[in-house]
Every structure is written in C-alpha cells, then in structure tokens.
Amino acid sequence: MRLLTHNMLSSNIKGVTNGFPLRIEVEKVVEKQVEINHDFLMNIFPKIDWKAFFDASRVMGYVELPEEAPEPSVLESDLEFLRKFHHALLELHLEEGALVCPETGRKFPVNKGIPNMLLHEDEV
Amino acid sequence: MSSRPELQAPPEIFYDDTEARKYTSSSRIAEIQTKLSERALELLALPDDGVPRLLLDIGCGSGLSGETITENGHQWIGLDISHSMLNVALEKEVEGDLLLGDMGQGLGLRPGVIDGAISISAVQWLCNADKSSHEPRLRLKCLARGARAVLQVYPENLAQRELILSYAMRAGFAGGVVVDFPHSTKSRKEYLVLTCGPPSLSTAIPNGKGEDGESCSDDESSGEEENRTVCISDRHRPRKKQKINKRGKGREWVLRKKEQMRRKGNVVPPDTKYTARKRKARF
C-alpha cells in the first residue's frame, strides 16, 4: 500500500466521527521504483492532507519531506521537491504492518501490501 | 446458462482460489472484462488533457479492469471482498493499490478525493445481501465534485435494475443508465452512470451503442460513430407481419437481414454491388 492510498483511507467504523488519518504500524517497508509524472503530482497535490502525509512518511522511515506544505507554485519550479514528493507518495510501500483507527484503536492488518478493511458485524 | 453466481454463494466464498484462477485464466472472460472496462472509462468522460487521474475500481477482483485503467495512464485504488481474487491481482503485479473490503460497508475513503469510479460486473452482488446485519449501501462520498461513477451491472431482472437506480437517485446522484446494444441478448450491456452534484450540461449522459433512431439527450461525446441512441428495454416492439415470398430470398431480403445483424452489433461485410448476386450453378 502506498502513501497515496493511505492518505485517502479513513476508518468507517460505526460511531467514529473522525477516522482520518489511520496510524501506521510498520513491520516491513519496500521501495519500488515508479516513473515520475509531473502532471499527476500537480493534480493530486491539493487533495493530499499534508500533515497526515508528512507523519506517515516519517513512520515509514523517510525524513526528506518538509513539515510545512509548500505553495502549489513550488511544484512547478522545484524539481528536487517534486522528486521527494513522488518518492514518498508512490514509491514507498507498506508490505506488512497495520493501520490503526485513531479513535477506537482497532487495527486493520496489512499483509502483502493489502490492508484488510473488512469490518466486523458490530462495527458496521 | 448456469445459475447466476450471485445466487450460489456470497462473493468472498464463491471466488475461492479455484474460481479466482478460472476467472482470470479464461481468455474469453478477460476479453469481455477488458472491453467493459474500456467502455466504462469512456463513459467516465475524464478531461482529455493527458493528466493522470486517481480512480477507484469497485470490485476490482483480480485486477483485469485495473490493468485497463493503468493502460490508460491513470492511477487507481481497487477494492474487493475476495482474498483469492486479490491474490491473483498481486501475482499479476498490478499497478494499483489493493484493499480487502466490502463495498457495502462503506468505501472507507475521505470525501472528495477520487476523480472517478468504475465498477465492472460487481455491484449486482450487493443486491443479494447475505449479511443480515446491515443493508448494503454503496456510498460514494469519496467522489470529487463533478466526478462520475460508472457501474457496469448485470441486473438479474428489471426489478433489480430499478432498485439499483432508485437507490442512486435517492442518494442524490444525477445520472441514468446507458445501454449498449439493447436488442441483442448476447451483446447487451448496461452501465449506470452517476455524477456527483446537481445535474447540468456536463452531467448529461452519453448515448448507448447500437440502435438507429433519434436521440433525445445531449451528445457530449462528439466525433463518435453515427447511429447512437439511448434506449432502455424495448422488448414489446410490435412484430411486423411479412408476406412470404415463395420465389426464394432475393437481394432485398438479404440486405434487410444484414441491416438487422448490424443493428444487433454483429460484424457484417459491407453492402456492395456483389451482395446477393446470383452465383454460378456450381455454388
């Protein structure tokens, strides 16, 4: 699971008011090279919740991202930042671990890169 | 035809390892799914600006439809309830991220982050809810404003189609059903096209394929083939009573038949001066 997906995921357990973001528990991280696409990055940038993204990247072991989200105009000029953004968003994969609901503490296990988001009967 | 899969078992049980492998290794199924996915992507009407979008594949299964999305240059997140099917997707090393989840339990995504959603042959499973503890609803809050969801469905009957559509309308979606080749039982395909937000010119639904006649909705897919109309079922067309020509089947009959086949969506050689020409006695 990439951080792109993690940034979109939210816990929808019954009764939870804010299930975003899910805390990451890392057991295994894998890096996979992906071709960079500027258009995609510029399009997705406004949708990313930067704080969640920054925290998640730290947990995954990547420390190159700035804590403050830069202005969108920076994306067009700063290639170095774009490369770091791309790397953290699309090239870091959580292979094994868990995602934790911020309110209930319920763990969603991640195996082979696939988070198991199936809710139990009483959580729906 | 054997009983519909939805009536045999819930999807996470029906699609076990054997079935998952069968489904993916069948080249016929793969071809059909690819065609359905391409049509669904077409109906999503994403802007033609070369910018890759983030799409959702609801009921992605073994990633057949996801691969089509990748080929069209977009990123995607896939959701499926079957462990076995997702394992096959892993083996195929699909580009999209996979989630193991139940589409009826809520997609678990933040509102407004997805640029479009497709679902190929999956939503009808919701209509046979096996979990009595909840009423399955497909919640699409994650769609951005103006984004579309295109759900290709195989409704069991008219009632099921009405049910799916009415839930969508009640949830506040604009949209409708696009039917390709409505008169052919074999080629007929239905797509539920939903848009977030109030209906406007941009949410007008494109026309279905394969029927002559007038269209009444806005045609925003310009430059497409001729003869496209939107058409929901038309089973009660009055049959014409033909006078049987005892002198055999002439050129007119042949041309008429070919036109009929074309309307059904079959591949028919073009009509030329050689069509229905009298052959040598040897033939």
Image (cartoon, rainbow, N blue to C red):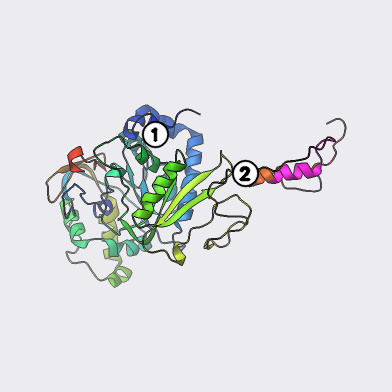
Q: Counting residues from the N terminus, which is met first, the one under dot 2 or under dot 1?
A: 1
| Mark 2 residue type | Lys
Q: How many callouts does the rendering have?
A: 2
Residue B59 vertical placement versus B41 (above, below): above
Of the numbered discs in the image, which one, if any, rests on residue A57?
Answer: none
| Mark 1 residue type | Glu
Q: Which residues are magenta?
A: B243-259
Q: Which residue is labeled 2 in the image? A: B264
Quarter holding the C terminus of chain B is: top right
Query: Is residue B119 visible to the viewer in this orientation of the structure?
Result: no
**Rendered residue at 86%/30% (across/down):** B282
Of the numbered discs in the image, which one, if any, rests on residue B6?
Answer: 1
In the picture provided, is B273 more to the left or to the right than B266? right
**Rendered residue at 26%/64% (across/down):** A81
Q: Quadrant of residue A26?
A: top left
Is residue B244 shown in magenta? yes
Q: Chain of mark 1?
A: B
Residue B66 horizontal/vertical position (percent):
40, 46
Question: SS for tag 2?
Answer: helix
- The one of A47 and A10 positioned closer to us in this rendering: A10
In the picture provided, is B251 more to the left or to the right than B152? right
**Rendered residue at 57%/55% (across/down):** B229
Q: Residues within 10 Å of mark 2 (few under 14, many from 20)?
A: many
